[in-house]
Image (spheres, grey):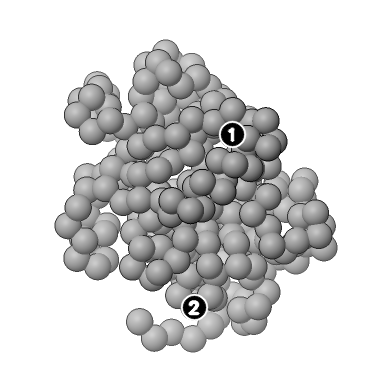
Amino acid sequence: MSMSIPTPHIEVKDKGVIADTVLMPGDPLRAKFIAEKFLENVEQFNSVRGMLGYTGTYKGRKISVMGSGMGMPSIGIYSYELYAFYDVKRIIRIGSCGAYTEDLDVYDVLLVDEAWSESSYAKTQSGYEQDTTFATPKLNDKLANIAKVLDIPIKRGKIHSSDVFYREDFNVYKHIRDQYGCMAVEMESFALFANASILGKEASCILTVSDSLVKGDVTTSEERQNSFVKMMEIALEMAE
């Protein structure tokens, strides 16, 4: 697809403003929090539709952070534009998830290796017929090593990327967990991984457990916005 910058959704005119590595929380206010708490020399590069984006330095190294919005159509747009039109090399989604298994507790950090979905996103976008998309193995291994150095415990595995938040049959998660081996649920990674694959880019996803469908534990929206710092610290080390 041919398109010039700025794009319809990202207003910055100089592609060099955005770093090679972009962290993407779903919530743009989480992007703002990361920029204010962790980055120096911060420049805001986007505010279109309230989808805030920032570039700064972390330990002297350049990195960007931008919200993706909720759901695959939203992250599908922003990640595609960042990859295809702003020459971003890698995107690391940092988000929240709901646990499907008793092995995950609230605040646990999960590094996603693959995302299973019922979504038609990848088929519609590029004709991809499979129900699973994959993170970039080399990037995931780097993130796992960073977590080890930082002494932050992580778990790795497969997640469910769902198009639906309010599913009428709540208990269907048990079938998805048992049939497809999904440890948790979120709503974006399947599309992010699909875009990275077709564009020859890198993608990873680090999630913090915000609630448990099994145990009934939950966190507040403020806690999700401001307190999931361990996954942020891991991802920020990818600054270059």
- Which quadrant, please, contains the C terminus? bottom right
Q: Position of residue 230 (x, y in %)?
A: 65, 35
Marks 2 and 1 sit apart, C-alpha to C-alpha, by 30 Å
Residue 115, picture quadrant: top left
Q: Amino acid at mark 1?
A: Arg
Q: Between disc 2 and disc 1, whose residue precedes?
A: 2
Query: Taking the image as drawn, is residue 27 in sight?
Result: no
Q: Amino acid at mark 2?
A: Phe
Observer able to see residue 132: yes
User: Toward the viewer: 218 or 47?
Assistant: 218
> Where, quadrant-wise, is the N terminus in this rendering?
bottom left
Q: Residue at x 59, y 42 (%)?
A: 145
Horizontal side, residue 136 vs residue 17: left or right: left
| Element assignment for label 2 | helix
Residue 40 x, y percent position in the rendering: 82, 57
Q: Which residue is mark 2?
A: 85
The residue shown at (75%, 66%) is 43
Nearer to me, 172 or 48:
172
Q: Which residue is mark 1?
A: 224
Write the residue at 45% across / 75% down: 84
Q: Is residue 154 above or below residue 85?
A: above
